[in-house]
């Protein structure tokens, strides 16, 4: 009976990973819809109880108010995903790093 449980646990983990990948993709596409010029990155690196991260780097010409609007809108969608799936995906908007 133990091998069956192990197989079921693995299937549950694979299903959860597939769901996470789908929701990260959904959030990335939504971020690009909100700001097509932004660079958007997704990560499945887990810290504490987080399942993944979406990081948005808008163009430097975007106003601070617009950056905040994007972050709040994206975070609201991530909250809806959490309510529906239990996946905790953090979303953040950062200034584009400058290279010297």
Image: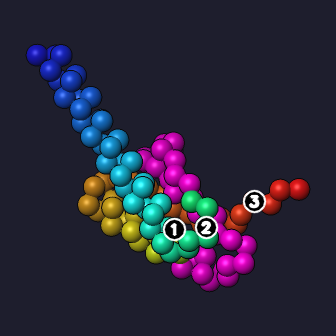
Q: Earlier in the sequence, mark 2 or mark 1?
A: 1
Is disc 1 placed on a helix, strand or loop?
Answer: helix
Q: Quadrant of the N terminus?
A: top left
Give the magenta range.
41-69
- How far apart are labels 2 and 1 at the CA level? 7 Å
The residue lying toward the viewer, choosing from 41 and 69, is 41
Q: Which mark is residue 13?
A: none
Label 3 environment density (alpha carbons within 10 Å; few <14, some 14–19, many ≥20): few
Residue 16 location, quadrant = top left
Question: Going 73% across and 73% down the picture, which residue do you hit?
Answer: 60
Q: Which mark is residue 97?
A: 3
In this view, 96 is above or below 4: below
Is disc 2 placed on a helix, strand or loop?
Answer: loop
Residue 97 picture location, percent across and down: 75, 59
Q: Tell whether 11 sits left or right of 98.
A: left
Say which residue label 2 marks.
38
Q: Quadrant of the C terminus?
A: bottom right
> Which residue, as the protein is rendered here, is positioned at the far front?
36
């Amino acid at each position: 009976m133990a091998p069956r449980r192990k197989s079921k646990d693995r299937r549950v983990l694979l299903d959860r990973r597939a769901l996470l990948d789908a929701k990260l993709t959904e959030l990335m596409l939504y971020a690009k819809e909100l700001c097509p010029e932004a660079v958007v990155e997704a990560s499945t690196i887990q810290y504490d109880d987080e399942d993944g991260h979406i990081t948005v780097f808008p163009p430097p010409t975007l106003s601070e108010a617009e950056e905040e609007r994007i972050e709040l809108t994206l975070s609201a969608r991530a909250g809806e995903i959490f309510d529906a799936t239990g996946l905790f995906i953090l979303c953040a908007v950062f200034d584009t790093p400058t290279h010297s």
